[in-house]
Image (tube, rainbow, N blue to C red):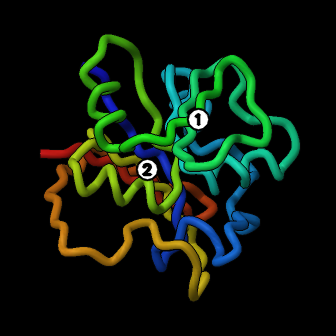
């Protein structure tokens, strides 16, 4: 069975992006464990807005990794590694998890994260909290009645004030 990991950054007040989807506030002075995590990733999952945001920064940032983009519209750009998925995301991801293979990274966005939370499809949460308050934006976890108990695996604190928390699902 494959493991799905949500490796994501958030502001101190819980936003993964500004209201317009921009992430200009993210620290870029070091990689904060990103490369070591990325080297383990075999497959990526992302929503359409996250995919579009990736393309807006220039070259596609995940070459050579299998990616599934959940969208009801055709993709504006793709290659052999990228596939649009228009069906039920929960069923697709549950099926993907049941297969043999490497780590699956849930890149974002908010709607896809909410679907995965609702169906308990996330095995690990790696949340990097940036010491910035955005005031508003796209929340990491949308308002819902869902409740999940997690087990803290590790914490890392960096000189910049960023704190990285790693949890696994109970």
User: Residue 118, position in %: x, y?
Assistant: 24, 57
- Mark found first going from the N terminus, 1 or 2: 1
Residue 154, picture quadrant:
top left
Q: Nearer the viewer, residue 144 or 158?
A: 144
State which quarter of the image contains the N terminus.
top left
Q: Residue furthest top?
A: 100
Helix, strand or loop under label 1? strand
- Disc 1 from disc 2: Cα separation: 35 Å
Residue 93, picture quadrant:
top left
In the displayed structure image, the side of residue 31 where residue 90 appears, left or right: left
Q: Residue at x 46, y 73 (%)?
A: 14
Q: Residue at x 74, y 52 (%)?
A: 28
In the displayed structure image, the side of residue 105 where residue 121 appears, left or right: left
47 up-or-down from 85: above or below:
below
135 up-or-down from 163: above or below:
below
State which quarter of the image contains the C terminus.
top left
Q: Which residue is mark 2?
A: 156
Crowd band around label 1 with a 10 angstrom C-alpha radius: few (<14), some (14–19), many (20+): some
User: Residue 40, position in %: x, y?
Assistant: 49, 21
Q: Which residue is mark 1?
A: 84
Q: Residue at x 57, y 85 (%)?
A: 136
User: Which is closer to the viewer, label 1 or label 2?
Assistant: 1
């Amino acid at each position: 069975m494959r493991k799905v990991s949500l490796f994501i950054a958030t502001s101190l007040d819980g936003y993964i992006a500004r209201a317009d989807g921009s992430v200009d506030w993210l620290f870029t002075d070091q990689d904060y464990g990103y490369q070591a995590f990325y080297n383990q990733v075999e497959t990526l999952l992302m929503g359409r807005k996250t995919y579009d945001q990736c393309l807006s920064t220039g070259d596609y940032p995940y070459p050579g990794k299998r990616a599934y983009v959940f969208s009801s519209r055709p993709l504006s750009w793709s290659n052999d590694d990228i596939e649009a998925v228009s069906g039920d995301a929960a069923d697709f991801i549950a099926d993907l998890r049941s297969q043999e293979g490497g780590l699956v990274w849930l890149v974002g966005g908010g709607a896809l994260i909410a679907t995965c939370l609702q169906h308990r499809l996330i095995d690990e949460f790696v949340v990097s909290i940036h010491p910035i308050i955005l005031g508003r934006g796209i929340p990491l976890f949308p308002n819902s009645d869902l409740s999940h108990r997690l087990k803290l695996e590790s914490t890392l604190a960096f000189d910049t004030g960023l704190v990285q928390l790693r949890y696994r699902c109970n």
